[in-house]
Amino acid sequence: MPQERVAFILIIATTDVSMIPGTTIAGATPELTMYTPAADAEFLINGKCDVIKGVPITPDGIPSPAIISRASLNLTGLPTFVLNAGAKVRPLAIPFFEVGGEPGKDIRSGALEMNVMERILNNSMRLGEQLSRGFDRVIIGESVPAGTTTAMSTLVALGYNAFGKVSSTSPDNPMELKEKIVREALSKVSDEEEKIARLSDPMIISASGIAQGFQGKIVLAGGTQMTAVAALTKKLAPMKLKDMEIWTTKWIVSDKSSDILGLASQIGVKVEYSPLDFSKSKFEGLRVYEKGYVKEGVGAGGLSLFAIKMGFTIENILKEVEKVYEEAKNEKI
């Protein structure tokens, strides 16, 4: 693996689903979820945020998994790119790709117009083709608050049994609320061709586009949201599935309120997971990951697993994560 030319790309987006109370804790308030993707991207690249102060946090003050991703990138030195697929708040302090996307609306009233979806998909495919010229493998991460709800609606729209199977940033997965939202959204879509545009999100569409255009190995670094990317790719370019894997965290795989392995099995995509463990961390904000908070995001599972495949130990990664976290806390002050 080390001799491969590998790059990491973080795709950011928002939808108005995260404004529905109770759907996500990927931000201190529903309104702040609109800032989370841009803040994650800035923190990943710069180690600090400009769109908000400090580190993106949950309402309980638990830090974004961007700290795991940044620590892993510090160790591996992977080239890193950010793609804005449709975020309401754009990063201020970093360069990023644009694919002509727009923020998704509430899926109950239709997330995207068809022409916007097609533009995101086609431009992302072109980007995937260009990345192929410099890299053998691309690791794709995401930051999309409430993205598991749009992942569920995408999977169900594509014919998969996804009810009760997607994960959550909270240990108390609001599955009934997600299912209610998705069923209402599904009931309002009659045109088969418009299903994905109306029920998905910009990240899923863009990630699938990159995967379709990229001529090499594809790692979807994330949780149950990435099963929706794999499913959409299988629908649009089934031959690409053989080059695709999902790399996630042990916290997602062991989550009893979701079923990433079951979803992946339905689709036919392989799953690997990082055994990263925070139980011995000196910081409470990290130890609570072991209690089911946050679990995944910003490519944390895929990037830490890549670091392990390069020869870094769990202890090496934890030490670097704690260093990044401590620097971020000092930056906030």
Image (cartoon, rainbow, N blue to C red):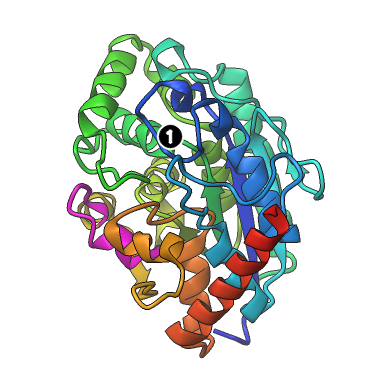
Residue at the image position 60 percent from the left and 28 percent from the top: 118
Which quarter of the rendering shows the C terminus? Answer: bottom right
Q: Residue 94 in the image: x percent, y percent?
A: 80, 50
- Which residue occupies the foreground of this view, 177 or 160? 177
Residue at the image position 46 percent from the left and 68 percent from the top: 283
Q: Residue 243 in the image: x percent, y percent?
A: 46, 64
Residue furthest bottom in the image: 311
Residue furthest front in the image: 333
| Residue with the mark numbered 1 | 146
Q: In which quarter of the image is residue 71?
A: bottom right
How packed is label 1: few (under 14 Cα within 10 Å), some, or many (20 or more)?
many
Q: Is residue 27 above or below residue 318?
A: above
Residue at the image position 38 percent from the left and 12 percent from the top: 191
The answer to whether residue 229 is left or right of residue 160 is right
- Which residue occupies the foreground of this view, 257 or 211? 257
Q: Secondary structure beneath disc 1?
A: loop
**Residue 173 shows up from this direction:** yes
22 in the magenta segment: no
Q: What stretch is highlighted in magenta?
A: 243-260
Residue at the image position 65 percent from the left and 61 percent from the top: 328
Please name the amino acid that badge 1 sits on.
Ala
